[in-house]
Amino acid sequence: MAQTSVAFHNYPHTYHDDRQSAYLLPNSSPEQERLAEQAAGLKALVGGSVLHTKNLENIPEARFLDIGCGTGAVTYEIARQFPKAKVYGIDLSTIQILDNKPPNVEFIKGNIFDLAGNDPRFQLGSFDFVFSRLLICGMTDWVKYLKTVASLLKPGAPCEFQEFTWEHYINGERVDTKWKWMQACKEGSRRQGLDLFIGKTMPGYARDAGLTDIGQKEYAVPTGRWVAKSNPQAAVIGNFFEESETTFFLLAIKRMVDETQCSEEERKGLAEECERVCSAEREGRTWPLIVTTARKPE
């Protein structure tokens, strides 16, 4: 196992304490650092402006919401871009407050399912924009989630979701279907109620929640430094995944594939295969990040 992976996996991680959520990843300092690096890479990949939703300017007394805000990186971006708006960031774990926190940001620890319609700050029909990114490893009820988002939006207000889909491609050819460790993760996640294809399946959930004007934009996220020559804009996220991809997927195996699915020895074999694949099949490999935008009807 690579030195970075060993250090990460041996770290005494902590996890959120919300029993309603299956979020698989830790909330300790190494994970916070990983999330911050990932946020910087994704921002560069999409051209420096995180949001794809248009016409958010000049909304009187605007109220924006970032669900599952993690480190707060995107919350800060939204708040700085729209300094007159009140921007809420909510997460299952306590958000670390940085010295440069914009004055229009308020962070809240909690579960959106508990707060929506119950907390006075989360009154139904009160938000002008709702955003979330990378809930893929924790959301087990996308039907309820999209309906909750729709209930929080004002009539006509937009929302945006940015999610991966766990499919890997090399030169346009899908390669993950032959990886045993990936199939085991997908089976384990399905048992836990997760949707590892949510990037692509999001429009269906949005339609079922009554949202309209649904659109998508897909980005091919590189998994290595090889992308620097052909697409410098993607170099930051490519470098990030070259350094951290194996660590992330090994943790996914540990958390998604349990003893009811296969033995400890079999899980060890899956982890070894994962390390080989992530190294040997890195050149030219990408996986999709898909941005879905939608709107609540008037």
Image (cartoon, rainbow, N blue to C red):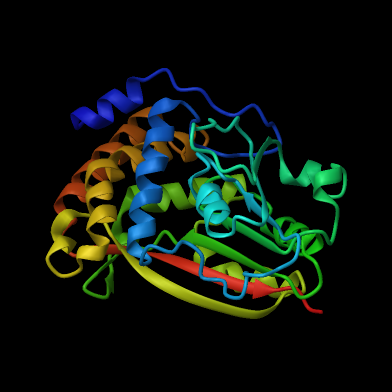
Q: Nearer the viewer, residue 184 or 96?
A: 96
Left or right: where 298 falls relative to 281: right
Quadrant position of residue 12: top left
Where the N terminus falls, by quadrant? top left
Where the C terminus falls, by quadrant? bottom right
Q: Is residue 200 visible?
A: no
- Count of labels in the image: 0
Q: Nearer the viewer, residue 248 or 118?
A: 118
Q: Nearer the viewer, residue 240 or 100?
A: 100
Residue 18 image point, x, y percent: 68, 31
Residue 171 image point, x, y percent: 21, 73
Residue 290 image point, x, y percent: 46, 68
Q: Residue at x 81, y 72 (%)?
A: 155
Residue lying at the far top in this picture: please name it: 12
Position of residue 98 relative to residue 72, above or below, is above
Residue lying at the far bottom in this picture: please name it: 213
Residue 201 image point, x, y percent: 56, 69
Q: Residue at x 44, y 37 (%)?
A: 262
Q: Is residue 41 visible?
A: yes
